[in-house]
Image (spheres, grey):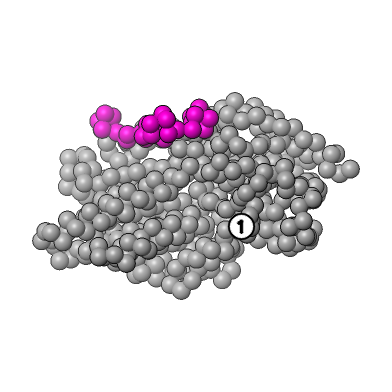
Amino acid sequence: AETGSGKTLAFMLPLVLDVLHARMQRRASVLDERIGDGEWTGIVVVPSRELAMQTWRTASHLVSRLNRSALGAIAVAPLLDVESSSETDLGDRDGTAFSVQQDTAQASRAHIVISTARALFEAMNEDAAVRRKLVANTRCIVLDEADRMINVIGKYARTRERDHAARHRASKPLVQILDYISDPNVRGSSGCIEGLQVVAVSATMGRPFRRMVNTILHIRDMQRGPAVITPMSVMPLSRVDTAATAQSADRIPVGIRHILLPVEDESPEFEHRSGALHAVMLKLRPRNALVIVGTDQSVPAAISVLKMLGWRSAANLSDEYEIGAHGCPNVASAMLDAGDSASGSQSDRGSTDKSVKSIADVKVLVTSFGATRGLHLDGLEYVFLLSGAPSLEEYLHAAGRTGRRGAPGTVVSLLSWPEAKQLRSQQTPLGIRLERWTLSAFLS
């Protein structure tokens, strides 16, 4: 389903109900005493620590009322890694270090575990009890942003990108986890994964992904492969917004404006494009913004430049996610302080908006491509791209941080001429229409 359509709730609600059902079944039967009361019944695997925190918060909110009922408490716990936010290194994270071992201990008695792929893989390698729970206890494993973790390349990718992905796919933590839990020698079955449901969730999944999942899960019969579920397939036509569903599931919400602003600059360094970004943001005066730099650009360096230019509230998106005692996440600070920015149209929020007194007060979060996958930032108005997206899928996910749940949003791409030419050529497969801006209009 498209970005911002509520996929987290779509898999979390059934997962909570499944945990309740499993617990009642366990209480009604005699089980091996080594297996706890529904420990690790459900596992949600995500590509980044930030998304794990957000999902943990959603799950905790769902079970909070249920835990005060006579049905008994459902424990939800995070299992996070320390090395980096996602598959790509996003820079230093001072003051947020913690150990996977602490999280494993905290999560050992949980019914639902929210984990990054790397943390689950490390715990599986180091602890036999974790491996036993994965095979004996787990009824459902949800792979949020699955195509990112398995490293599936879209059909428009270049040959070099396809070859690179194929060479490194087997070493991906999630691929090794799925290979282990579906191995017939481990499960004692004849090539199938009976008793385990695998749910893959993303806005960008096609036939190459489904074929790859069949291979990883040792499914030889293609008829028993993954079933595809879209909003159109589960909702009556009378309940579906035809404007939103006229496009395929892997398209960008129709309420987002896409702006292309070419800059006379061939260098990918942020310092060379910071002046253009500064001029555009001064003119637009957003209440909040997300700035995404390229994979070869430095997030800390971008933040330093923005602060030097006067945007003193600029911060690393990852640093906004706090880690409490025992690795327990607190994501309250990560939500953009948009006030009532979710209401009203963007046309009413220009430089005449008196609620933004100074650019020093504008909340600007900085990150890189891939790190924003699945994240929901309340009231986010603008996304600024300071580099061409590595792929069509990454542009889709970056743009999808704004314009969520029917709200308006704007994506501004400040690109070199070659990058601008490439983005213009991708309008049709992305299903977007670019508006062309010129830098001279912001420098006058």
Q: Which residue is mark 1?
A: 336
When the figure is inspected, residue 64 is found, relative to residue 375, above or below; the finding is below
Picture coordinates of residue 325 (x, y %)?
46, 74
Q: Is residue 82 visible?
A: yes
Name the secondary structure under disc 1: loop
Q: Is residue 380 visible?
A: no
Which residue is most to the bottom?
Answer: 325
Residue 239 magenta-highlighted: yes
Q: Nearer the viewer, residue 344 or 296?
A: 344
The quarter of the image holding the N terminus is top left
Q: Which quarter of the figure has residue 404?
A: top right
The quarter of the image holding the C terminus is top right
User: Would you say 284 lies left or right of 97 here?
Assistant: right
> Three-letter amino acid code at disc 1?
Leu
The residue positioned 85% from the left and 39% from the top of the image is 440
The magenta region covers 220-248
The residue positioned 26% from the left and 29% from the top of the image is 223
The residue positioned 80% from the left and 47% from the top of the image is 283
Picture coordinates of residue 265 (x, y %)?
78, 41
